[in-house]
Amino acid sequence: MLDEVDRTNFNVLVESLPEEMTLDEYISLATSNTGFEYLSNENYTVDGQEWNEVVSLNHQEGTKLNQRTFMIGTDVYIFSYASLPENYDKHIEVFESITDSVAIQ
């Protein structure tokens, strides 16, 4: 939890896939049946590593979610930041700083 009072949290997840796929294929599968409202879905490159950033609204939980994802082989690394929409901007810079500091070797 980044802030328990305003329900802002940060998580990191590593998912191992049964077979290699492209980042776009993975994002398409991961976002296909969530029921979320997607506000943006962008690929970008940092230091030669392709990332994806998806921002969505989860109306059922009432949260705004930012997920930044990259892949190495069959391993998917997902960094998630979620908050109430009115508190989203309060800690987004911390999340961006964390993901911007990731060094892939």
Image (cartoon, helix red, strand yellow):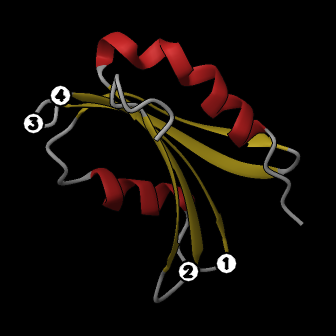
Foreground mark, 3 or 1, reads 3
Specify the quadrant that holds the C terminus: bottom right
* Mark 2 or 3, nearer chain start: 2
The residue that appears at 84% across and 60% down in the rendered structure is 104
- CA neighbours of label 3 inside 10 A, class few (<14), some (14 to 19), many (20+): few
Asked if the residue at tag 1 contacts the one at tag 3, i.e. Cβ–Cβ closer than 8 Å, the answer is: no
Nearest to the observer: residue 1 or residue 104: 1
- Alpha carbon separation for disc pair 2 and 3: 32 Å
The amino acid sitting under disc 4 is Gly
**Residue designated by label 2:** 20
The residue that appears at 24% across and 53% down in the rendered structure is 32
Secondary structure under tag 4 reads: loop
* Mark 4 or 1, nearer chain start: 4
Foreground mark, 4 or 2, reads 4
Asked if the residue at tag 2 contacts the one at tag 1, i.e. Cβ–Cβ closer than 8 Å, the answer is: yes
Nearest to the observer: residue 63 or residue 16: 63
**Is 35 located above or below residue 62 in the figure?**
below
